[in-house]
Every structure is written in structure tokens, then in C-alpha cells.
Image (cartoon, rainbow, N blue to C red):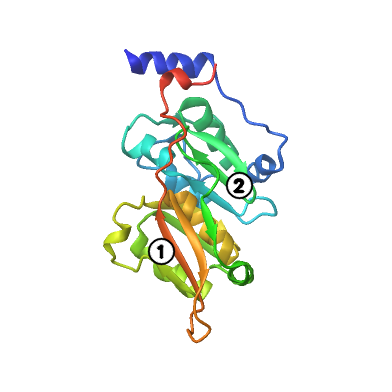
């Protein structure tokens, strides 16, 4: 019965996206693969990350843990696409209309999230010079990370930002990190740290180590326990 009520709300009270926003215009130029008619738990994340293209407005498309939970944990997210040649904007619109997933543009990222996901990262800066150095480093030019764990991402971050990234690979300290799903183009090292924090629901601290240490910057990630609110059918927009 709750499922029936949910789909009544979907049909009668659709969410809307600001089509005039620059990010929306950019996504409207990105076609999905031919033949995609539905976004489901087995296809949605892969299809959308693959469709995300380099542009002047949005540098990363990030599925936050609340959004992926709608697919993988609660198994209640599914959206139909009715356009003959759907774009990434059509996919985002379908998700926000037909599921509890929301879209928020936090430049330069488009965040796909639920009501529980914090939309501002928790960052502790103990070294301003370290932050400036991270802003000058470059992440990979194009990366697609679909359900990747910390052990996959940590060595990539460590190489790109030329600093120590904690917790170490294969460390027990990362066991409670969420898996990461995002696609990105041309991020700085600093932006990559933010993207990973959003995707994995983590917080991080930037500190500077001894000048005698070859890797002078250290970035430590820890779980972010914040929850804005638990998504419910009652919270569905009317």
C-alpha cells in the first residue's frame, strides 16, 4: 500500500528542475546511450556517469550515499524515461520527479542525494599553505568511479595530490566509509578531495608535515556521521 501511495504522489506532485540554470543547459547537451528507457538499480548509476561529459559549468556528477541507498539498500528507486532520445538532464529530471532522490548544484559539483545527505562538507584546515598547494595539483583528467571502495581511490588520490592520504590502503579505519560513485573532469587536487568526501560521506583534515618529509601534505579522512533528516514518503514534494 505504501508503494502505491508513493507512486500516486509521483504522478500527481512531480518535482521540477530549473531548466534555465546553466548546469541544466549543460546536461541537456549530454545524450544517454541509445535505447535507455528506464533508470533502475542495475543501470542508473552506470548509465548516468558514463553520459557525463566535459563542460564549462559542472566538473563532477556525484551520487551521494543517500541516493545510492535508494537503489541498493531500499530498492525503491526506479524512473522511466519517455523521451525518444533522452539526455542526462532528462535522467536527472526523471529521478527527481519519480524517486526520493534530489539534485543540488554546489559549484562545481552536481550532487544527487536524498534528504539525509549533508550538502556542505566538513573540512578542517590546519595548513593554509597545504590547501594552496592542493589547489595547484591536478586530479586525473577524466575519471569514472562506479561503486568504488576506499582501497581503490586512496592510491589515486595519493599520487595526484603528492601527499599522504589517510587512512592507508587496506586499513581498518576505512571499513565504515561508503563506496564512491562519481564522474569528474579536470578537477584540481582540492576539488577531488571534496568530491571524494561527498561521494563517501566523509570529512577530512588538511595538515602540513615536517619540511624534512618528502610528502609535506597529509590529508586524513574520517566518517561523517551527520544526517539532515530521514527521507520518508511524507517528505515527498507536493
User: Is residue 46 found left or right of 122 in the rendered image?
Assistant: left
Mark closest to the chain's N terminus, 2 or 1: 2
* Residue 104: image location, x then y, percent: 58, 38
Residue drawn at point x = 48 percent, y = 80 percent: 215
Q: Tag 1, which secondary structure?
A: helix
User: Is residue 144 found left or right of 27 in the rendered image?
Assistant: left
Q: Tag 2, which secondary structure?
A: loop
Residue drawn at point x = 40 percent, y = 71 percent: 155
Q: Tell me if residue 127 comes above or below residue 60 in the rendering.
A: below
Residue drawn at point x = 46 percent, y = 44 percent: 64
Residue closest to the eye, 212 or 56: 212
- Residue under label 2, please give it: 30
Q: Residues within 10 Å of mark 1 (few under 14, many from 20)?
A: some
Alpha carbon distance from label 2 to label 1? 26 Å
- Residue under label 1, please give it: 153
Quarter of the image that includes the C terminus: top right
Amino acid at each position: 500500500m505504501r508503494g502505491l501511495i508513493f507512486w500516486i504522489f509521483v504522478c500527481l506532485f512531480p518535482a521540477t528542475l530549473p531548466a534555465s540554470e546553466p548546469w541544466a543547459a549543460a546536461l541537456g547537451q549530454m545524450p544517454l546511450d541509445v535505447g535507455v528507457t528506464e533508470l533502475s538499480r542495475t543501470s542508473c548509476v552506470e548509465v548516468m556517469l558514463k553520459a557525463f561529459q566535459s563542460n564549462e559549468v559542472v566538473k563532477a556528477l556525484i551520487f551521494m550515499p543517500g541516493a545510492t541507498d535508494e537503489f541498493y539498500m531500499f530498492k525503491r528507486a526506479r524512473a522511466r524515461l519517455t523521451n525518444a532520445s533522452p539526455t542526462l538532464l532528462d535522467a536527472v529530471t526523471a529521478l527527481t520527479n519519480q524517486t526520493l532522490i534530489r539534485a543540488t548544484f554546489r559549484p562545481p559539483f552536481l550532487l544527487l542525494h536524498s534528504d539525509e545527505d549533508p550538502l556542505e562538507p566538513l573540512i578542517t584546515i590546519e595548513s593554509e599553505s597545504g590547501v594552496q598547494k592542493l589547489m595547484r595539483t591536478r586530479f586525473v583528467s577524466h575519471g569514472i568511479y562506479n561503486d568504488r571502495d576506499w582501497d581503490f581511490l586512496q592510491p589515486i588520490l595519493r599520487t595526484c595530490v603528492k601527499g599522504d592520504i589517510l587512512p592507508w590502503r587496506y586499513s581498518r579505519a576505512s571499513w565504515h566509509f561508503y563506496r564512491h560513485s562519481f564522474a569528474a573532469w579536470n578537477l584540481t587536487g582540492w576539488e577531488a578531495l571534496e568530491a571524494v568526501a561527498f561521494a563517501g560521506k566523509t570529512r577530512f583534515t588538511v595538515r602540513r608535515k615536517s619540511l624534512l618529509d618528502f610528502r609535506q601534505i597529509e590529508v586524513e579522512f574520517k566518517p561523517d556521521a551527520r544526517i539532515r533528516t530521514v527521507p520518508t514518503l511524507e517528505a515527498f514534494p507536493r
